[in-house]
Structures are given as structure tokens and as C-alpha cells.
Amino acid sequence: MAKEDKLAFRFDCGAVWLNLLATRGRTFSPNPVERLATPGRLTEWLERCELSPTRPPDQHDLERAWKLRETLRALALATVDEQPPPADAVADLAAFLAQYDDPVRLAADDRLRREPPATTVHALARIARQAVDQMTGSDRLALKSCPEDDCRGVFTDPPGRRRWCPSPACASRGRVRALRARRNAAAAQSNDDQTPAR
């Protein structure tokens, strides 16, 4: 079995904004994995999301991306847990969106397209609006978070069948833990059955 590349971008969470959250892996562990460590990595990620701005990102843009990502993470986890959203995250997101108007301008050649964002923050504003649309509408009911304490990755699961996030590592760890628990429970039951009655 091939070893998972911890720095590889994930594009399997169900929406671009959820894939942004996945640019930081094992977020709640002592050693989180930062997949957007440089402006160049942010450039690559935006390109893969078809959101390349006309001017490439700089360090300040990268810091804005990190801040937006963590603001959206706080709101997403509150949404999944059906808890009131953190007031500071709501205020931060509202202030960010108020600064960056991004009118929809369409182009049609081989397919319907939207004009590229002018700047990185305009690309981030598009991602933030996608997040708001999902978290405030009925699509929020399809959001789930990974039960692994160090991950808590948010993803869409419309059928409601997934237990872990799309990361193979989380599912593997969860299954191993569940198997051990079943074996321990079976061993404890077997010991109880063999204990003579007094």
C-alpha cells in the first residue's frame, strides 16, 4: 500500500470551501500539517480550483487565506454540531465579505465560465460566499465532521453514510480502534462467561 503524502492537497471534501479547510491537516493535533505553507502553494491550490487571480498571491494574501480558512472552520464545526456560531467568526466573515464585492461576469466559449478573480482576496471572497450559501441553506444538513479528535475535517455526505472524512488515514485509524474495542469487549465477555459462579 502506498504511503499517503501528507502535503498533498485534498479535493475530495465536496466543495471548494471545504477543500480550503483541508489545506491544514490534523488541525487539532500537536503537529498540524500545513499544506499552504507558501504563496507558491496557494497559487497552485487556487489554480487547481480554477480560481487563479490575474495577479499571483503574496505573503499577505497567504495570511488572509489562513485567517479565512480558520474563520470558516469555526463556523463549519458549529454548523455541523448544531451550535450557535462563534460571534467573532461571524463578525470576521461579515467584515471580510463587506470589503470585497465581486460581481458575476460570465464568459462563454467552450463552456460557461466566470471571469477570473482580479486578486487573491477576490478568489477568497468567492470561496467565502460559497461557504455562506452552504452553511445558511438546507445544504448544511449534508455537512459532517470527522470523528477523529485531531482531525475534525468537515465534508459533505448527502447520503449520510460516511463516518470519517475522505482521508484514508482517519478511516484506517478509526477502523483499527473500533476493531480493538470489539476484540476487547469480546475478550471481557469471554472472561465473564468463564468465571465460575459462587
Image: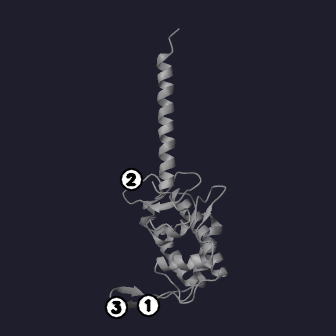
Q: Which residue is drawn at 48% across and 25% down?
A: 189
Q: How crowded is mark 1: few (under 14 residues within 10 Å), some or many (20 or more)?
A: few
- Distance between the Cα atoms at labels 2 and 1? 38 Å
Q: Residue at x 61, y 79 (%)?
A: 39
Of callouts 3 and 2, which one flags the residue occurring earlier in the amino acid sequence? 3
Residue type, numbered disc 2: Arg
Point out residue 148 in the picture as x, y percentages from the top left corner: 54, 51
Q: What element carries label 3?
A: loop
Kindly give the residue lying farthest to the front in the view shown: 1
**On the image, numbered disc 2 is attached to which residue?**
161
Q: Residues within 10 Å of mark 2 (few under 14, many from 20)?
A: few
User: On screen, 185 above or below 174?
Assistant: above
- Distance between the Cα atoms at labels 3 and 1? 14 Å
Of callouts 2 and 1, which one flags the residue occurring earlier in the amino acid sequence? 1
Q: What element carries label 2?
A: loop
The answer to whether marks 3 and 1 mark residues whose Cβ atoms lie closer than 8 Å is no
Q: Is mark 1 on a helix, strand or loop?
A: loop
Point out residue 91 in the picture as x, y percentages from the top left corner: 63, 72
Q: Residue at x 53, y 70 (%)?
A: 20
Point out residue 145 in the picture as x, y percentages from the top left corner: 50, 57
Residue type, numbered disc 1: Arg
Where residue 87 sits, quadrant-wise, is bottom right
The front one of 144 and 175 is 175
Q: Residue 109: which disc?
A: 3
Q: Residue 105: which disc?
A: 1
Point out residue 185 in the picture as x, y percentages from the top left corner: 49, 31
Q: Which residue is drawn at 50% across and 68% down?
A: 19
Q: How crowded is mark 3: few (under 14 residues within 10 Å), some or many (20 or more)?
A: few
- Taking 171 as reference, is 38 left or right? right
In the rendered view of the protein, which quadrant contains the N terminus? bottom left
Residue type, numbered disc 3: Asp
